[in-house]
Image: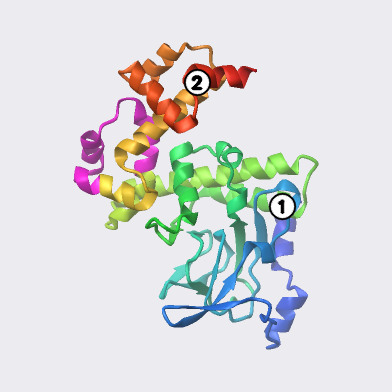
């Protein structure tokens, strides 16, 4: 499928959309309603809208035009991309305007709705269910385990997290290309479609991390909660010899505030995140290099070999040598 063919497909008015334009309302009786803060909200489950998709870990749909949607929640991560036109979304009681090329990343359980779309308003949704967010899935992403942990934390209802991020990506050339090629592959699968879709989705998520980081650097956004993704990226890139005070100076934040911010959004303190990244790096080196354990300990930034052994076993259940032996068996 070419981009022109994709554009034609997305703009084609479906039978359901034609009915909605005539005022025929959809049947929503199969979906349960719940009360949230005394407001009736429709609840969607991933199992109701998806199938196994031949091992592909997401579901892609075009949002139907010409219809009202009730306030609703769903139990999946949702990425909505404004392919054409614009729309208004009501998220947690506040209206947000999406322009062409912008994208929203939304956590499960977020109360929202999308106001009726006009004919030129094309909104594409990518849904990711919790069961599909496996280690193998996140290992494909360009971001490391820390950034992956941030996304997977969307399903952790016991920790505080942002309900959504609106990415100011309307002028980002690469994201547009990645998403269009991803959609072409989705609607017209090739022989290698599983690898193609997974790899292109990895590029989409990696570019979102770049966009957020660039936006924070260039605009000095006042909302300090938005520092979380750039902080995680910074830890990922500098874990070997990083310190809390040095990181706080880089971002112009108070050290205690920075650590509390990370704890709030990831469930882990600054030091815990650094330790997690060091251990993940050590594990990758045990898997993929001939370095000795002592060399690995020094490389990832630990000063005490005994301390490293204890932490590695606490995290992975085996001593480093035992882990490497099991992997090579």
Q: The magenta stretch spans which residues?
A: 231-258
Q: In this view, does 89 lie above or below 221?
A: below
Dot 2 and dot 1 residues touching (CB under 8 Å): no
Q: Is residue 241 magenta?
A: yes
Residue ID for mark 2: 285
x, y percentage for residue 211? Answer: 44, 48
x, y percentage for residue 79? Answer: 55, 58
Q: Quadrant of residue 83?
A: bottom right
With 48 as the anchor, is 209 left or right in this view? left
Q: Can residue 311 be seen in this view?
A: yes
- Seen as rendered, the residue at the extreme right is 191
Point 30% across, 25% down: residue: 241
Front residue of this view, candidates 292 and 167: 292
Q: Is residue 267 above or below residue 109?
A: above
With 240 as the anchor, is 185 left or right in this view? right
Looking at the figure, which quarter contains the C terminus? Answer: top right
Q: In which quarter of the image is residue 174?
A: top right
Question: Mark 1 packing: few (<14 Cα in 10 Å), some, or many (20+)?
Answer: some
Point 35% across, 48% down: residue: 228
Q: Magenta: predominant secondary structure element?
A: helix
Residue ID for mark 1: 186
Q: Quadrant of residue 10?
A: bottom right
Tell which tag, 2 or 1, sits nearer the viewer. 2
């Amino acid at each position: 499928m070419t981009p022109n063919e994709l554009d034609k497909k997305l703009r084609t008015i479906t039978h359901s959309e034609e009915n909605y334009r005539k005022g025929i309302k959809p049947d929503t009786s199969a979906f349960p309603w719940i009360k949230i803060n005394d407001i009736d909200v429709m609840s969607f489950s991933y199992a109701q809208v998806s199938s196994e998709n031949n091992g592909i870990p997401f579901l892609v749909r075009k949002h139907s035009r010409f219809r009202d949607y009730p306030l609703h929640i769903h139990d999946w991560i949702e990425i909505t991309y404004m392919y054409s036109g614009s729309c208004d979304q009501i998220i947690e009681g506040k209206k947000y305007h999406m322009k062409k090329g912008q994208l929203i990343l939304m956590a499960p359980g977020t109360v929202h709705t999308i106001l009726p779309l006009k004919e030129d308003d094309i909104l594409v949704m990518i849904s990711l269910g919790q069961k599909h967010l496996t280690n193998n899935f996140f290992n494909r992403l360009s971001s490391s385990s820390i950034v992956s942990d941030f996304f997977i934390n969307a399903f952790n209802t016991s920790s505080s997290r942002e309900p959504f991020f609106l990415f100011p990506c309307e002028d980002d050339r690469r994201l547009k290309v990645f998403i269009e090629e991803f959609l072409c592959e989705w609607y017209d699968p090739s022989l290698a479609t599983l690898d193609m879709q997974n790899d292109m989705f990895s590029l989409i998520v990696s570019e979102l991390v770049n966009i957020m980081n660039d936006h924070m650097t260039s605009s000095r956004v006042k909302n300090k909660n938005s520092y979380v993704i750039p902080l995680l990226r910074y830890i990922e890139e500098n874990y070997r010899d990083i310190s809390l005070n040095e990181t706080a100076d880089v971002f112009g934040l108070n050290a205690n505030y920075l650590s509390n911010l990370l704890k709030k959004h990831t469930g882990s303190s600054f030091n815990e995140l650094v330790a997690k990244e060091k251990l993940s790096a050590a594990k990758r080196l045990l898997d993929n290099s001939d370095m000795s354990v002592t060399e690995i300990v020094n490389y990832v930034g630990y000063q005490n070999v005994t301390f490293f052994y204890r932490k590695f076993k606490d995290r992975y259940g085996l001593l480093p040598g035992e882990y490497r032996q099991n992997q090579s068996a």
